[in-house]
Amino acid sequence: MEDHVLAIDIGGTKLAAGVVDPSGHLVRSAMAPTPRDGSGDDLFAALAALARSVGGGDEVACGVGCGGPMTGRGELVSPLNIPAWRDFPLRARLASALGVPTFVDNDAKALALGEGWVGAAVGVADYIAMVVSTGVGGGIVLNGRLVEGADGNAGHIGHVIVEPEGRLCPCGARGCLEAEASGTAIAAITGAPAAEASPEVVARTGRLVGRAVASVANLLDLGLAVVAGSVALGFGSPFFAAAQAEVDACARLAFSVGTRVLPAGLGSAGPLIGAAAVARRGAGLPTGR
């Protein structure tokens, strides 16, 4: 399997692993719930077992998308929605367990790479990719290159303040987009899963996401936001209409007028294809970013 890569997505509610071919096609995959009890080592053992179950043994690299924050390309990860991992040495542990070169990045930055490779942002030089799911994350591409930041944490749109003096976020601030519009936040606010949200909650979630996107568009001179994640894609067209209306109302500079909010093009496969793009970039294989 020439240039096939192993892809891993680590989320607060589920783990996924798959094999992706050089054209960005997901060949096979498997998923499992993220263990909520036990130690960090227990969680890692479940992740490694899942990855081995899909790998064919001849993949050239492994790419991982994981929630942040993290240090130095995933050498140490501390996902806010996975309390068992604080300064967990994810990259080195996976490389040892799987026996292939392993590359780790923020899950939303991975999505940005995947959407620019074979998704809704193909051919676009400046955009943000977002995940609105259990949490909220983002990855930014400017001038055709993924924005990294000092420790690789650039793009955390989930921690843009959208409701001053709003709900307390796990990061310690109040009113973050993640504290107001994530699946976790919606469940806490309404007492029901996001999948059962009322039309009013769907519209509010879209407005808050649009508010954050407009701020990024005004700050960074980009004209496209592609949005993935179970909340955004599950809410569907009413969510995207509300987000677009808020962007239109708030992105009023000459260069930000017309900023678009679109569903991510890769759908449910996006996290794994994004992780594959991380692997390919790390291994020096082409992805276009």
Image (cartoon, grey):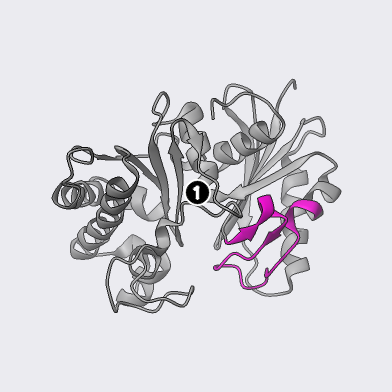
Estimate the x, y position of residue 249 in percent, counting from the top left. Answer: 14, 51
Q: Which quarter of the figure is the N terminus placed in?
A: top right
Is residue 184 found inside the magenta-colored segment of the image?
no
Q: In the image shown, does 281 or 14 lie closer to the viewer?
A: 281
- Which quarter of the image is occupied by the C terminus? top right
**Of the residues shown, which amino acid type is indicated by label 1?**
Ala
The answer to whether residue 187 is above or below residue 126 is: below
Q: Nearer the viewer, residue 144 or 46?
A: 144
**Where residue 256 sits: x, y (%)?**
23, 41
Secondary structure, mark 1, is helix
Mark yes or no: residue 191 visible.
no
Look at mark 1 in the image and give the residue it sits on: 108
The correct choice, above or below, for 237 with respect to 66 in the image is above
Quadrant of the rendered image containing residue 192? bottom left
Query: Crowding near pointer 1: few (<14 within 10 Å), some, many (20+)?
Result: many
Magenta part of the protein: which range? 69-92
| Residue at horizontal 64 percent and vertical 33 percent from the top | 281
- Judge whether 210 appears above or below 166 on screen: above
Left or right: where does residue 204 sit relative to residue 46? left
